[in-house]
Amino acid sequence: MKMLGRKEIERLYDAHAPALFAFLLNLTRDEADTRDLLQEIFIKLTRDATLLAGVREERAFLIRLAHNAAIDLMRRRGTRERTKENFAAEIISPFAPTSDPDKKVFREELAAALGELPADQRAVVHLKLWGELTFEEIAAALEIPPNTAASRYRYGLDKLRDTLRPLYEEIK
Amino acid sequence: MKPDEFEQRLSRQPLRQLPPDWRGEILAAAREAQSSGHSSPVTRHGWLATFNQQLSTIFWPHPKAWAGLAAVWILILAMNLSERDASPRLVVKSASPSPEAMVELKKQQRLLAELVGTYEAPDVDRRKIFSPRPRSERAEILMT
């Protein structure tokens, strides 16, 4: 099996690892899991260079790998871990820490509200808001129809809006 | 609140940064995988991993419940097998009774025959009496 060269894997890491890290951290809400998944993805890419052969959108392809790996992990974990996931917003936030009290409160509330979204909605919301992908790109990455991506985003955003409305109005 | 405003506000929230020390560790692990030249465990045990994954997909919601059900089935199977083992032994034992037991059995059979034997004759007669024959023929039987 043809392996990926050292320079190429470094290029892939520098180009995509930050985005994959943020995406995986938002899905798993666990830094150790995020690291393991990121390493798993890059080892997989190194071992099989053919994985990227013919791939036009590297970012979308890598997000698909990351999403599948995260979903597999969540399935393996079972009920106990899924319960933990529901409260994971208290454990770790995907947002950068800040010293500004208003921003801090808003990010904490946003992290908690995101944590309450189902994983499929959270993935789409993340990729749209922070991955800056179009619905077509999200659809390609997650292997869902573009309409499904759009509706998941709408549902997810509506829930976030409902949850965060009082705080948003207060600090706007 | 305008949706655009809200979305923009959300998208402006900066995400946590990838820890810089991960780069060295992850790339080292990738290089190690490269130099070892082994195929990944997933590839090497492809069918096993797939089977395992399928099983975990089926059982992950309630593993304890499934384990309990499996234990109950194993218990039922064990009881069933132990009963099946015991029944042929009973047959073997009953197939070869001791001579004393045979003598005793014959005695009891004789006694029973004596006790029951008194009722045999009337039974035979009753059968004759109530046999479906014409009344004229029945009279002949009684005469004899």
Image (cartoon, coloured by chain):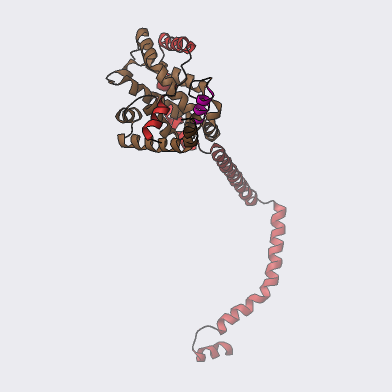
Camera-side residue: A97 or B120? A97
Chain letter, red: B
Q: Is residue A15 magenta?
A: no
Quarter of the figure that contains the N terminus of chain B: top left
Camera-side residue: B74 or A146? A146
Chain letter, brown: A
Q: Can I make out residue B44 in this image?
A: no
Q: Can I make out residue A33 in this image?
A: yes
Q: Quadrant of residue B65?
A: top right
Quarter of the figure that contains the C terminus of chain B: bottom right
Where does residue B52 sit, x and y in percent of width and height?
A: 46, 30
What residue lies at 50% left-to-right and 25% top-to-bottom? A103
Bounds of the magenta span? A100-109
Camera-side residue: A130 or B67? A130
A154 vs A45: above or below = below
Count of labels in the image: 0
Where does residue B134 sit, x and y in percent of width and height?
A: 49, 89
Where does residue A4 sit, x and y in percent of width and height?
A: 35, 12
Q: Is residue A105 magenta?
A: yes
For residue A31, side relative to residue A152 (left or right): right
Where does residue A2 sit, x and y in percent of width and height?
A: 33, 13
For residue A146, side relative to residue B54 (left or right): left
Q: Quadrant of residue A157?
A: top left
Q: Give the prevailing secondary structure in the magenta stretch.
A: helix
For residue B7, side relative to residue B69 (left or right): left
